[in-house]
Amino acid sequence: MAAMRDAHSSLAEEDCRDLRFLVFGGKTGWLGQSLVKIIADQAPACKVIVAQSRMEDRAQVKKELAETKPTHVLCAAGVTGRPNVDWCEDHRKETVRANVLGTLTLCDVCDEVGIHLTIYATGCIYSYDAEHPLGGARGFTEEDAPNFHGSYYSKTKGMVEELVQPFLNNTLLLRVRMPLSEDMSAPRNFIYKIARYERVVDIPNSMTSLPDMLPVSVLMAVRGLTGVFNFTNPGVISHNQCLELYRRYVDPRFTWRNFTEAEQARVLKAPRSNNMLDTSKLEAMLPDVAIPDILTATENLFSLSSDRPHDGTSASATSIPMTHEQITEVKFKEICFACKYINTRSIRENPEFVILMKLYTRKAEAIGQPALFRAPRSISRCKT
Ligand SMILES: NC(=O)c1ccc[n+]([C@@H]2O[C@H](COP(=O)([O-])OP(=O)(O)OC[C@H]3O[C@@H](n4cnc5c(N)ncnc54)[C@H](OP(=O)(O)O)[C@@H]3O)[C@@H](O)[C@H]2O)c1
């Protein structure tokens, strides 16, 4: 039996020779740019191409597919609204044009020419209900009909899921939720957002840790999987659990205030979805990939983050700088976690990582602890 592979480096172990990925959203999008980088890092034998056409322009899309000849199309494009999905309430034509007409056009054209398509969709089409209660063990499956239509964004995403059904022979649709990344200064990162809100609700939710799940998504495309998948780490994490980790790893003096969903509704244009997705279909389809539960995955992100905002921009008004001793201790832990990710080229070549590795090696020697990782020559030469 093949050995289990870690989600975050799962793509690196797959044979991806001669594959060509065309990425929609790869030029300016958060997920799209991350995908381009992950493919370049983990599957350097592949060609990755950033799409230029607008999805709803059928002629342009067909021309681009004919010119670039991808083996796979990844669609991480669409409007999500700025600063948030409330924007879609007042920009309905733009929302339909990109998220409905655009996604379906791309789907139809890829089907016509027989190129596998992966759509990065959303799991924000459900809301806890009597059959799937908050705190219960039963999550929404891929077969459950959407029950959250509270925002225009979610409503149209739910409609697209239904309309995509005839194309699922050629299409992989992944339901992403509340994406998290190790970049704690990325404004799209869910943790960045809630750490800066004046008040937050505290509701357990399914969430997607991008460093784990984006490589898995490309792996699924390479394997030619199709159909709808709940695409989150298993389990749920609440807003307060995320913020407790933020306080532990980023800012020990960080404080926040909660409010109820009813109070939240007064400051939002459209309601938000809260739910738990059942990930058993995803896990069964990838028996050789270890996808960490969301609590472990989120803690890993903080441990990995080399970009902690010690810049006074966090929500806490009482932030104080960490002592040199505290920083060294945190970085030491960070390195121990980073060692697990040593196969990821972007981390291995990151100059800060290289310096931290040297500090780690010295500290491990000083306290007589065996080094978890043997520093390559480039690191032992490096001046700190
Ligand atoms: N971020 C989240 O919280 C989240 C959660 C769940 C699911 N998702 C889904 O994941 C996908 C990507 O999200 P994201 O956060 O990466 O969004 P993003 O940062 O706003 O990027 C969206 C990308 O889509 C491109 N785009 C928009 N309309 C287009 C069109 N008509 N044709 C071609 N490209 C178009 C944009 O390009 P231009 O700049 O050129 O317009 C941009 O590159 C979306 O479909 C979203 O629904 C996101």
Image (tube, helix red, strand yellow):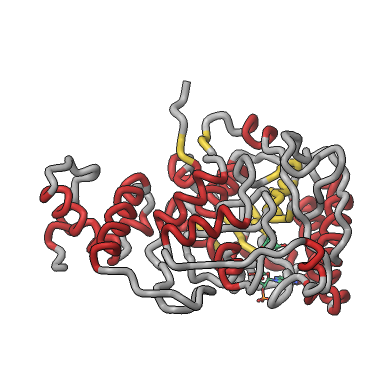
Vertical order, 310 against 252 (above or below): below
Residue for point 68% across, 33% down: 280
Residue 216 lies left or right of residue 305; in this view the side is right
Say which of 44 and 125 sits in front: 125
Please count the marks in the image.
0
- Image position, residue 103 (x, y; %): 78, 61
Residue for point 56% across, 40% down: 293
- Image position, residue 380 (x, y; %): 13, 57
Say which of 212 and 108 sits in front: 212
- Image position, residue 148 (x, y; %): 86, 54
Position of the C terminus by quadrant: bottom left
Residue 88 lies left or right of residue 378; in this view the side is right
Vertical order, 314 against 362 (above or below): below
- The image quadrant in which ligand 1 is located: bottom right
User: Could you tell me if residue 1 is visible in this image?
Assistant: yes
Residue 152 lies left or right of residue 118; in this view the side is right
User: Could you tell me if residue 115 is visible in this image?
Assistant: no
Residue for point 45% across, 45% down: 9
Vertical order, 140 against 313 (above or below): above
Residue for point 41% across, 67% down: 308
Kindly indicate the quadrant of the structure image that contains residue 323.
Answer: bottom left
- Image position, residue 120 (x, y; %): 69, 55
Kindly indicate the quadrant of the structure image that contains residue 370.
Answer: top left
Residue 79 lies left or right of residue 247; in this view the side is right
